[in-house]
Image: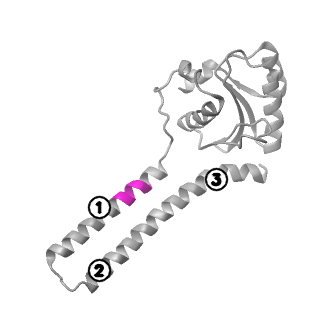
Amino acid sequence: MKKIGRENFSLKQRHITIRICSYIAAMILSLCLLVFIIQTSQSHEPRFIAAIVCVWVLFFLFCFYKIYRTKNYKGVFRKGALSVGELDNLDGIAFEELACEILVANGFEIAENTSASGDYGVDILAQREGMSYAIQCKRYLEPVGLEAVQQVYAGRAYYECHVAVVLTNQKFTANAQHLADKLGVVLWDRETLRNFL
């Protein structure tokens, strides 16, 4: 993949790593603070020390929980929670954002939106089992035409992805299906989307 594609794929991983590191740093600093308070405390009453240790244990457990949640975050989408009809009411941007979460819930390790402007016909960059996907999302009220196939085919080449996909909440026109067959573009229509949900 091109450098820009790698940067998009690794952005989420960097954010997760930074958050986990900040929680670990907070745990270490809080432990140092606990030791310092106990050593410099004038009154070594057992109640005081027990209270400080209890507060630290609660903070430690909170940080550990946050690390666990951050590592295992899969988004807010849960399989079986939505119907295709509910997706028809979303705007285009919300549809793209939800599509990322749907892909992750269906086995993709990474699924991230590209920038809204200058996306070269690709709305989502995704990865599963070593294969990279350039995906264009079309939340339409009517069948999707061949322009979407042309755009994602060009975008796949730009991002140097293995697979070009058009994902829609509708069907595809016969021309779009014919062109997709010729170019090797994968079409995920309303039925495919229903299976993802």
User: Alpha-carbon neighbours of circle 3 within 10 Å: few (<14), some, or many (≥20)?
Assistant: few
Question: Which badge, 1 or 2, is on the more N-terminal residue?
Answer: 2
Query: Whole-Å distance between the Cαs marked 1 and 3?
Result: 31 Å
The magenta segment = 62-67
Question: Which badge, 1 or 3, is on the more N-terminal residue?
Answer: 3
User: Alpha-carbon neighbours of circle 2 within 10 Å: few (<14), some, or many (≥20)?
Assistant: few
Q: Nearer the viewer, mark 3 or mark 2?
A: 2
Which amino acid, mark 3?
Leu
**Residue drawn where x is 60% and y is 51% of the image:** 12
Tag 3, which secondary structure?
A: helix
Display colour scheme: one colour
Residue 13, given in percent of the width and then of the height, sits at 59, 54
Which amino acid, mark 1?
Leu
Query: Whole-Å distance between the Cαs marked 3 and 2?
Result: 39 Å
Which amino acid, mark 2?
Ile
Residue 38, given in percent of the width and then of the height, sits at 26, 80
**Residue drawn where x is 48% and y is 30% of the image:** 79
The residue to which callout 3 is attached is: 11
Q: Classify residue 50 as left or right of residue 173.
A: left
Q: Classify residue 180 as left or right of residue 141.
A: right
The residue to which callout 1 is attached is: 58
The residue to which callout 2 is attached is: 37
Q: Which mark is residue 147?
A: none
